Image (cartoon, grey):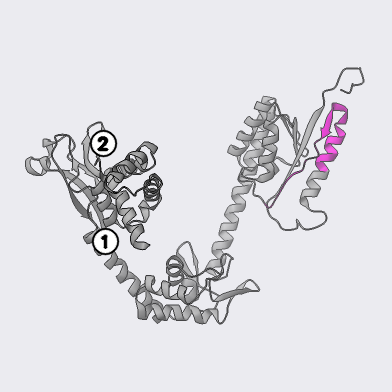
Amino acid sequence: MSRGPEGKPIRKLRCAVYTRKSTEEGLDKEFNSLHAQREACEAYIASQRSEGWALVRDPYDDGGFSGGTLERPALQQLLADIEEGLVDVVVVYKIDRLSRSLMDFSKLVEVFDRAGVTFVSVTQSFNTTTSMGRLTLNILLSFAQFEREVIAERVRDKIRASRQKGIWMGGSVPLGYMVKDRKLVVQEPEATTVRSIFERFVRVGSATVLARELRDEGVHTARGKLVDKGYLYHLLNNRTYLGLAVHKGTAYPGEHEAIIGQDLWDKVHAILAENARTRSAHTRAQTPALLKGLLFGPSGAAMSPTHTRKGNRLYRYYVSQDVLQRGRDACPIGRVPAAEIEAVVIDQLRGVFRQPEIVVGTWRAARAEEDDVTEDQAREALLQLDPLWDELFPAEQARIAQLLVDRVDVRTHGVEVRLRPNGLAGLVREAGSSRRAAA
């Protein structure tokens, strides 16, 4: 330990320099903004050598990261080193290099205080250990946050104004275009592919069928992936192909050339609208209630599925037979929202699939019917059902619920789900039969 002029020992303070730049522009230069910040901070640390300050050589540089978030790799490493007790002083060029958010900065100050770390800005002199220093810090941070919000507002205004003039403002380049001199330019033969997709959809009338055909033909997206149904819907709804620039849902005439004519666009979207209505009506007509015949109220009366409509929205319920026959006051729980009670039952079922004791019991029950069922097969059948549940058709979900659930009782204090003893075993036997048929 070194000593001061009066012979008193001076505690060594390990100083970490943190630098940040919001954009990556200029970072490839031999001497950039991060270097300038670091040089100023190191000079300040050197001027405090008589106070025991010593530079920590580990670099903490975040190039291309916004000050509006704490999710920055160098900052996270700095915080980890502080928690490990490797840093005594954090030195920055300006406080907004550390953060532009008052809330985020308060979190950082808590970390500093807990670890006994001092914070220093070489261009703004204050001491965070005093109340006046904290007041000064809060004032400076308020202005830094205000500046960030003003800059963000200006950027949003610029983007909106540019979009209104039809100017391309970056982002994912749609299939059929390329960017040249910051403008969208039609690129053949991709544009021909886009026109063909629109024309084929009018003839086929099904996104599922067309997506399968395009995949079989090896048609790729602009990023080189095979076209799927989701990408196809996105392409068919992209108004950029009409020569429009879209901002916040509002379309403006664009600077770029259209690939699709309005007549072809209207034909495609008439089919999409009709398909949506047909699918909705078919789903409502064909989807069975998951808990039909399984749900009972507090009095033991069955609860039957029903629905009501408000505008274009459909609301599903289960209603007690007591209420239907004797009025609203006949049951303390007259009706329950279908989605909520079904979600409760599904969650309990999915939890059952993962329990080891359930796996063993299911295997033993299945083996009693088919002695060639192994424990691994039982485990696989149950574990596969959990992640695949959301992918099953509603009718299949209802069939499995009827197979597994014996009864669901809705109480005033909760829900009780009673499973069928051999339901899971039957499910495993079905899975085994499917495997043998596939083989």
The residue at 86%/19% (across/down) is: 9
Q: Quadrant of residue 10?
A: top right
Q: Is residue 367 left or right of residue 285?
A: right
Which residue in the protein does label 2 denote?
415
Label 2 packing within 10 angstroms: few (<14), some (14-19), many (20+): some
Q: Is residue 46 left or right of residue 186?
A: right
Towards the viewer: 263 or 297? 297
Q: Quadrant of residue 437?
A: bottom left
Label 1 packing within 10 angstroms: few (<14), some (14-19), many (20+): few
Spatial separation of the CA atoms under disc 1 and disc 2: 28 Å
Residue 144 — which label? none
| Image x and y of residue 323, in percent | 12, 41
Residue 283 — which label? 1
User: Is residue 11 shown above or below 430?
Assistant: above
Towards the viewer: 129 or 287? 287
Towards the viewer: 103 or 62? 62
Task: Give the magenta part as a residue range.
Answer: 40-64
In the rendered image, which quarter contains the N terminus? top right
Q: Residue furthest left?
A: 326
The residue at 52%/80% (across/down) is: 191
Q: Amino acid at mark 2?
A: Val
Q: Is any part of residue 260 visible from this angle?
A: no
User: Is residue 49 shown above or below 325?
Assistant: above
Say whether residue 54 is magenta.
yes
